[in-house]
């Protein structure tokens, strides 16, 4: 097994360990029904060896953020009217196409939400992994296949040697997800984005895969962005959390304080509304109402129709994400009150 | 009178595997393979297990949407297979189902009023035609939907609202038993809690008994009085909720519970997690003896040879059914608060 570190190639050097910097990112979709403002000014950073969890409900913009970083949004209908995505200090949005191609993929790679549909059904999985080495590393066929086999073993595919020529449909959901991980780490990326890597899987398989991701990250000092809506998984693996709502970050903090004392009513609502395995609870404190339609995001704070604290100011003024306590960022006019209770 | 409302006895469902141009049956998927349990009036029985272990198939057997290959379903002590056509009509009113997927289980061309009111068309003697619209509006109100939205179509509702439509339809005929097949799995956490609370409220108000099928063990614990754990078509453990969660005796249950992430970062690395190796075997070709032996760290020769039965295995601490030759309680979930 090669233990080479996932350090960026010579072209890139992280500044003070900082790999990625997303600044004031905006993404909109131009649809027949109007402009859907999917991302409305999102900023965060990622350091080497760090796990950042992006949390939020369906439609809040988690995948679109990831797709913008990976440069795989279809434009049109998508448009990035503002923002920067810097990798080791260089903006991916403005760099020449040729350089961008050499960065996304080898340096920054991604595991997609749906493993089955992102593997090609007509090629053997071993061939698909080997193709990465042929394309990006110019390896010959037999070396590439040898590397593919090693990777399959690394992601714990049982009897990898016998299965290297099998097709995706011959693998279970959990094994397909491991193949996706193998492909995503094949080129030793410095940044790995995992979009709901275990949502479709059972808990026992989920545990295997999260352990695997953790080991790979430690071994290579990878920066990991984990996108999920599972507060349990986040509690197990994340160093920092960013919570999204209607295309904005509403809270950002280190893992421990945010679970102990959330600083935004939405985060608090999420934590209160999940049943816990280690408790036999009473009525769950559900968040009332529904997430907003992006074509008609409410005036002021987008969360105001569902918020128990909402006042006039919340219907009028958009709260900015501000530091409400050391290391704690919240986009709520009443963050201090939320923190206090 | 017994308080058992629904009972399954040694239920089996084998699906033929057909291959070749002649479509000859070359084997069987043993989706459900000898499941026995009882459901009491007004209680919630949770059914958990990994994908493909046979939970939905069991639900369909209980509804008699499918005929069992073998075994019996008793409703109020009566064998459903022996029921006359008119008795069967009555039984169909008493057991209803809510399906997993709020996006595909509702007919997109029917209005909400038609969907929720459809059971009254089928069982036309329940409510006279004139009173149906009013009853449908009452039902919508009961599940927290705006009664004025009776003429809207499913696509005009969110996932959580659609699941409420399915529930309103499920309770329309005042059933005694509601089978809920993953009713909240497709929903966001914030909306999931609304639907779970609704189900609990309806149970209190209407005295419904639930069979609650899900793969989320935390949700099942929250809502269930008793819990059954399935593995490859069989129940491996069955008992009161706190017995199964706090003193599981089957290694599979122990592994399953230990793998559930707890939303508390202070517990990171402190839980003793049992990581299973290998994948779930195929239900077409299940392992001999105990089906879990291929992944079990405690397996001995006897486990390959002899199938353990689901029975009480008293040991001083626990008193619930387990299908393990070496059943022994092990705490994997510490109760907090
Ligand atoms: N191609 C597109 N055209 C129009 N709108 C789009 C497109 N892609 C995404 N959107 C919208 O952008 C918003 C954010 O979507 P995104 O996929 O990022 O959500 P998500 O947070 O990943 O949700 P989930 O948890 O369901 O995966 C959604 O409202 C979605 O409908
Ligand atoms: N009509 C059918 N014909 C053949 N095989 C079937 C049929 N229905 C289900 N099966 C098989 O029976 C097994 C049990 O399926 P079932 O849908 O009951 O599982 P489940 O526990 O509900 O899974 P999930 O959690 O994914 O919903 C699976 O292996 C499935 O492929
Ligand atoms: Mg997504
Ligand atoms: Mg199912």
Image (spheres, coloured by chain):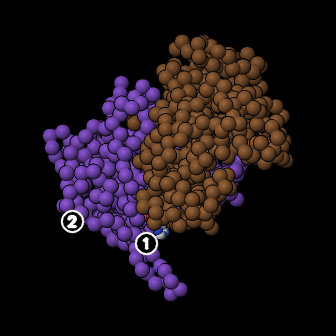
* Vertical arrangement, residue A287 with respect to residue B297, above or below: above
Q: Is residue A316 left or right of residue A270?
A: right
Seen from the viewer's position, the closer of residues A286 and A88 is A88
Q: Is residue A318 left or right of residue A221?
A: right
Q: Color of chain A here? A: brown
Question: Assess mark 1: CB under 8 A from ligand 2?
Answer: yes
Residues packed near mark 1 inside 10 Å, few (<14), some (14 to 19) or many (20 plus): some
Residue in the picture at 49% in, 38% down: A219
Q: Name the front one of labels 2 and 1.
A: 2
Q: Is residue B63 visible?
A: no
**Dot 1: chain letter:** B
Quadrant in the rendering for residue A249 = top right
Give the residue at mark 1: B15
Give the letter of the purple chain. B
Distance of label 2 from label 1 (alpha carbons): 25 Å
Q: x%, y% of residue B301?
A: 19, 61
Q: Is residue B320 left or right of residue B197?
A: left
Q: x%, y% of residue A26?
A: 78, 33
Q: x%, y% of residue B79?
A: 32, 66
User: Do residues under tags 2 and 1 come within 8 Å of each other at their CB atoms?
Assistant: no
Residue in the picture at 43% in, 75% down: B16
* Vertical arrangement, residue B112 with respect to residue B337, above or below: below
Give the residue at mark 2: B305
**Dot 2: chain letter:** B
């Amino acid at each position: 097994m090669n233990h080479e570190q996932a350090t960026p190639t010579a072209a890139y050097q992280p500044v003070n360990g900082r790999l990625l910097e997303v600044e004031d990112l905006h993404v909109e979709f131009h649809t027949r029904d109007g402009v859907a403002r999917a991302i409305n000014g999102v900023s965060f950073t990622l350091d080497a060896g760090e796990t950042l969890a992006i949390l939020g409900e369906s439609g809040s913009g988690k995948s679109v953020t990831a797709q913008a970083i990976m440069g795989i949004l279809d434009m049109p209908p998508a448009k990035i009217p503002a923002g920067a995505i810097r990798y080791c200090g260089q903006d991916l949005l403005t760099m020449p196409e040729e350089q961008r191609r050499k960065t996304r993929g080898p340096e920054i790679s991604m595991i997609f939400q749906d493993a089955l549909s992102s593997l090609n059904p007509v090629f053997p999985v071993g061939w698909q992994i080997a193709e990465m080495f042929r394309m990006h590393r110019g390896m010959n066929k037999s070396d590439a296949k040898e590397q593919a086999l090693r990777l399959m073993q690394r992601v714990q595919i049982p009897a990898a040697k016998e299965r290297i020529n099998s097709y995706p449909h011959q693998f279970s959901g959990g094994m397909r997800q491991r193949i996706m991980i193998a492909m995503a780490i094949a080129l030793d990326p410095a940044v790995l984005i995992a979009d709901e890597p275990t949502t479709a899987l059972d808990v026992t398989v989920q545990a295997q895969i999260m352990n695997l991701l953790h080991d790979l990250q430690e071994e290579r000092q990878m920066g990991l962005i984990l996108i999920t809506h599972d507060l349990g998984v986040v509690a197990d693996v994340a160093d920092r959390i960013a919570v999204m709502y209607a295309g904005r970050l509403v809270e950002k903090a280190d893992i421990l304080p945010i679970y102990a004392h959330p600083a935004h009513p939405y985060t608090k609502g999420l934590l209160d509304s999940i049943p816990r395995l280690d408790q036999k609870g009473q009525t769950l404190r559900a968040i009332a109402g529904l997430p907003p339609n992006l074509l008609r995001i409410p005036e002021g704070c987008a969360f105001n129709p569902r918020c128990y604290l909402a006042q006039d100011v919340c219907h009028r003024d958009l709260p900015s994400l501000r530091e409400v306590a050391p290391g704690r960022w919240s986009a709520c006019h009443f963050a201090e009150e939320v923190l206090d209770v | 009178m017994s308080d058992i409302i629904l009972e399954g006895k040694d239920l089996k469902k084998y699906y033929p595997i057909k291959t070749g141009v002649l479509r000859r049956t070359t084997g069987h998927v043993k989706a459900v393979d000898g499941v026995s349990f009882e459901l009491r009036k007004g209680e919630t029985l949770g059914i958990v297990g990994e994908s493909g272990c046979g939970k939905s198939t069991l639900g369909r057997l209980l509804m008699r949407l499918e005929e069992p290959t073998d075994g019996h379903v008793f409703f109020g002590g009566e064998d459903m297979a022996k029921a006359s056509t008119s008795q069967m009509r009555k039984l169909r009113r008493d057991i209803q189902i809510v399906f997993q997927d709020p996006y595909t289980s509702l007919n997109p061309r029917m209005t909400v009023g038609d969907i929720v009111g459809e059971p009254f068309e089928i069982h036309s003697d329940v409510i006279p035609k004139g009173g149906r619209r009013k009853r449908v509006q009452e039902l919508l109100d009961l599940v927290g939907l705006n009664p004025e939205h009776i003429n809207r179509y499913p696509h005009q509702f969110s996932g959580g609202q659609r699941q409420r439509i399915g529930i309103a339809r499920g309770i329309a005929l005042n059933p005694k038993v509601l089978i809920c097949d993953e009713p909240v799995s497709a929903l966001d956490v914030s909306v999931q809690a609304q639907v779970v609370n609704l189900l609990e409220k309806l149970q209190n108000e209407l005295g419904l008994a639930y069979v609650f099928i899900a793969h989320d063990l935390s949700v099942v614990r929250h809502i269930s009085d008793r819990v059954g754990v399935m593995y490859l078509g069989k129940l491996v453990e069955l008992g009161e909720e706190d017995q199964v969660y706090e003193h599981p005796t089957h290694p599979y249950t122990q592994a399953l519970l230990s793998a559930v992430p707890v939303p508390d970062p202070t517990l990171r690395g402190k839980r003793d997690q049992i990581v299973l190796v290998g994948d779930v075997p195929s239900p077409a070709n299940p392992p001999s003896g105990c089906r879990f032996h291929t992944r079990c760290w405690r397996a001995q020769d006897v486990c390959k040879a002899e199938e353990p039965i689901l029975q009480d295995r008293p040991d001083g601490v626990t008193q619930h059914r387990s299908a393990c030759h070496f059943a022994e309680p092990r705490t994997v979930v510490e109760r907090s608060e």
